[in-house]
Amino acid sequence: MENFVYELLQSVIKNVIDCKLYRRVSRVTHIILHIDEERKQEEQTLRELELQKIRLQIETQRVVGLQPLPSGPKRYEKGSETLNVGRQVSSRKPERLPKREYSHEVPNERSPLKCYGCGKPGVIKSRCPSCNPNSSQGTEVATNHINAYTAQTKSPD
């Protein structure tokens, strides 16, 4: 009798374990199938987006009349050559001369100051004593003010 109970208990335990194991395997299988289905959907979405991109590129080329876009990196060239940046571009402007290289002579020194009223060298018209007699008076007035201030502040000896 003990043997029978022992075998029955073993059989029940085995069935419980098998049932739990079956459920776990079933859940894992379901998860794997779900993940695989999501991956397939993502791949299909990527293919559809890539096709849409190609259609839009072809449509843009047809509408605008451009040549196919190059697949390589952008290439820039100097001077009057054309730029290759995925579309036809007119030639660049001609290169400029460096700043200090001019096509005409540029004087190295300034001409000396001279009054543009009478031509007197060394002064401008607003300070010229010939053209503006009041300009020298301003200097004298300033000198007089300094002399008056000095006289007031001197201490009596």
Image: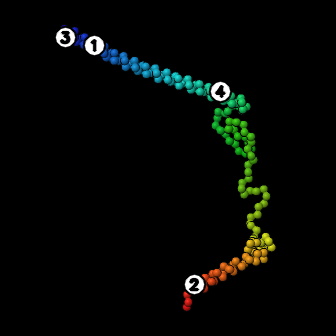
In this orientation, which residue lies closer to the viewer: 144 or 61? 144
Residue drawn at the location 74% of the way across and 77% of the way down: 134
Residue drawn at the location 52% of the way across and 22% of the way down: 40
Indicate which disc residue 48 carries: none
In the image, taking residue 8 as reference, residue 68 lies left or right, namely right
**Residue marked by disc 3:** 2
Q: Earlier in the sequence, mark 1 or mark 4?
A: 1
Residue drawn at the location 73% of the way across and 31% of the way down: 65
Q: Earlier in the sequence, mark 1 or mark 2?
A: 1
Quick one: quadrant of the N terminus? top left
Q: Is residue 83 above or below residue 130?
A: above
Residue 133 location (% of width, % of height): 76, 77
How far apart are the two marked residues, 4 and 2, measured between alpha carbons? 95 Å
Q: Is residue 146 above or below residue 88?
A: below
Q: Earlier in the sequence, mark 3 or mark 4?
A: 3
How far apart are the two marked residues, 2 and 3, measured between alpha carbons? 135 Å
Q: Is residue 119 above or below residue 45?
A: below
Give the quadrant of residue 121: bottom right
Indicate which disc residue 55 carries: 4
**Residue marked by disc 2:** 153
Proximity of marks 3 and 4: CB atoms separated by less than 8 Å: no
Tell me the element at label 2: helix
Tell me which amino acid carries mark 2.
Answer: Thr
Tell me the element at label 3: helix
Tell me which amino acid carries mark 4.
Answer: Arg
How far apart are the two marked residues, 1 and 4, measured between alpha carbons? 64 Å
Q: Earlier in the sequence, mark 1 or mark 3?
A: 3
**Residue marked by disc 1:** 12
How far apart are the two marked residues, 1 and 2, measured between alpha carbons? 125 Å
